[in-house]
Image (cartoon, rainbow, N blue to C red):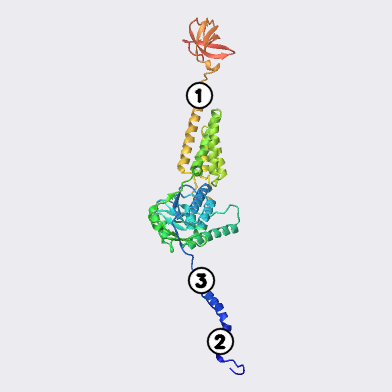
């Protein structure tokens, strides 16, 4: 090169030398852009479905759903979550439920971290309000043929004494909750508003005929249910999806503990009523025939057991005290000459109080069995009849004790009655006066009266005095 002039090839080499360090930066930026576009579809896609291969648990609910039932089912739900169970199947076989308790249980089921299947069975079961609430909250709702859910009264009843506006807001919230649960599970929510405010009853055929259906599965028995659950996808709280694998598997029952069994038994409305009646009978028997506190102790235990059961139920305490008043009236009839009138009134009060013992608005289907009411009424009536008969018989029986009890008794003459002498009667000597002349020693005379420790007698062959 002449005159310091740079050749074109040298200039190009220098230019490329200055640009070369910038190539790695562009490559990194371009790779980052490609990576972002590759990840975006994955972020938009739903989470991968996990396979549930844990144990399958089942629990049976056959009585009234109270706070004690809810405690048992919550324990079962906790055990299922701890074991990462495939599913928890709740077989619902009873119709009565305390609304305040079943609402809380439904919320727990909806938020469960394992699939919960509520199965109304066996055939002929009317699950009532409990079925409407729990089927709505369940991840999968199943019914056996010939079953139903719902009641003819509102599914939710606010506390009495609230304004109309508060009541409407409460019913609207209940409707929204039931509808949301069903809608999220892909089930029909068209019935929610009417059931919450007015009441509605659906058989399994009616529920399955809705569009979309109000239940997911209609299964004859538990084995048929497990077959129908195979391969079904369940979305849990938080969006996690689970695919059920139940084909060819057996469910393991989660039995209530001994204490839970006792509480479930005591909270049965019929059992609580019978315990109250037996407590009243035992305490009354203690006062009638003192037994050094044995019957009183038994009555106290029965009364406490009855109250433990009733605390879980919406008791109308006016009816509770009506039962106590009824027993008081029957007991009073044994000492007051009312000729059975008080017993009749007491039985009427007893029957009416037993029928209205529990608040039907707060606990649809929670009633004392009619056979128990009839049995108690018959037993009390029989007991009162025997008591009245014994009292009347005692009053009409001749006096057999004391001086009055000696009248019409035979006495042996020990000292000649002329007309006064001594007679032997009832193991003692008495001064006696004969009403008809004299009586010789060894003769028998009949006592006709007692006056100032002196007897009046008459001979056996003499006619009675006018």
Residue at the right extreme? 3
The span from disc 1 to disc 3 (Cα, nearest Å) is 104 Å
Which structural element holds mark 1?
helix
Q: Which residue is mark 3?
A: 39
State the mark number for residue 13: 2
Discs 1/3, front: 3
Label 3: few (<14), some (14–19) or many (≥20) C-alpha neighbours in 10 Å: few
Between disc 2 and disc 3, whose residue precedes? 2
The crowding category of the residue bearing disc 1, from other C-alpha atoms within 10 Å (few below 14, some 14 to 19, many at least 20), is: few
Give the percent coordinates (x, y) of residue 365.
48, 49
Q: Residue at x 54, y 29 (%)?
A: 288
Q: Is residue 68 among the parts visible in the rendering? A: yes
Q: Say if residue 351 shows up in the picture.
A: no
Q: Quadrant of residue 117?
A: bottom left
**Furthest-bottom residue in this view:** 2
Viewer-nearest of discs 1 and 2: 2
Which of the marked residues, 1 or 2, is nearer the chain's N terminus?
2
Mark 2 → mark 3, Cα distance in angstroms: 40 Å
Give the x, y percent position of residue 378. Answer: 46, 37
Question: Cα distance, mark 1 to mark 2?
Answer: 143 Å
Residue 234: percent from left, percent from top: 46, 60
The residue carrying mark 1 is: 396
**Dots 1 and 2: beta carbons under 8 Å?**
no
């Amino acid at each position: 090169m002449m005159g310091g002039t740079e050749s074109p090839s040298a200039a190009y080499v220098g230019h490329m030398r200055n640009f070369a360090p910038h190539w790695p930066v562009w490559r990194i930026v371009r790779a980052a852009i490609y990576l972002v576009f590759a990840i975006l579809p994955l972020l938009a896609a739903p989470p991968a479905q996990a396979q549930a291969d844990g144990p399958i648990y089942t629990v049976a609910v056959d009585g009234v759903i109270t706070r004690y039932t809810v405690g048992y089912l919550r324990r079962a739900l906790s055990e299922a979550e701890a074991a990462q169970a495939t599913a928890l199947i709740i077989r619902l076989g009873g119709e009565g439920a305390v609304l305040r308790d079943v609402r809380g249980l439904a919320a727990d089921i909806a938020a469960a971290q394992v699939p919960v299947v509520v199965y109304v069975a066996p055939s002929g079961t009317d699950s009532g309000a409990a079925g409407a609430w729990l089927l709505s909250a369940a991840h999968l709702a199943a019914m056996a043929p010939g079953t139903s859910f719902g009641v003819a009264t509102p599914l939710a009843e606010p506390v009495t004494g609230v304004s109309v506006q508060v009541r409407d807001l409460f019913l609207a919230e209940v409707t929204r909750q039931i509808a949301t649960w069903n809608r999220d599970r892909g089930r029909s929510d068209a019935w929610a508003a009417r059931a919450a405010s007015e009441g509605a009853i659906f058989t399994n055929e009616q529920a399955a005929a809705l569009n979309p259906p109000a239940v997911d599965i209609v299964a004859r028995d538990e084995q048929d249910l497990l077959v129908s659950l195979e391969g079904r996808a369940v979305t849990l709280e938080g969006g996690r999806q689970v695919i059920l694998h139940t084909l060819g598997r057996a469910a393991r029952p989660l039995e209530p503990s001994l204490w839970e069994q006792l509480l479930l038994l005591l909270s049965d409305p019929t059992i609580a009523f019978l315990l109250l009646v037996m407590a009243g009978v035992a305490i009354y028997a203690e006062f009638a025939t003192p037994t050094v506190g044995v019957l009183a102790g038994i009555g106290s235990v029965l009364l406490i057991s009855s109250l433990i059961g009733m605390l879980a139920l919406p008791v109308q305490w006016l009816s509770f005290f009506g039962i106590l008043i009824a027993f008081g009236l029957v007991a009073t009839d044994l000492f007051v000459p009312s000729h059975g009138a008080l017993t009749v009134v007491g039985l009427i009060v007893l029957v009416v109080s037993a029928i209205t013992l529990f608040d039907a608005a707060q606990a649809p289907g929670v009633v004392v069995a009619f056979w128990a009411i009839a049995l108690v009424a018959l037993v009390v009536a029989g007991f009162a009849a025997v008591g009245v008969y014994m009292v009347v018989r005692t009053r009409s029986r001749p006096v057999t004790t004391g001086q009055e009890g000696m009248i019409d008794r035979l006495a042996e003459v020990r000292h000649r009655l002329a007309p006064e002498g001594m007679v032997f009667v009832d193991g003692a000597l008495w001064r006696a006066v004969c009403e008809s002349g004299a009586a010789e020693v060894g003769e028998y005379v009949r006592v006709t009266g007692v006056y100032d420790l002196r007897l009046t007698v008459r001979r056996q062959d003499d006619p009675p005095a006018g």
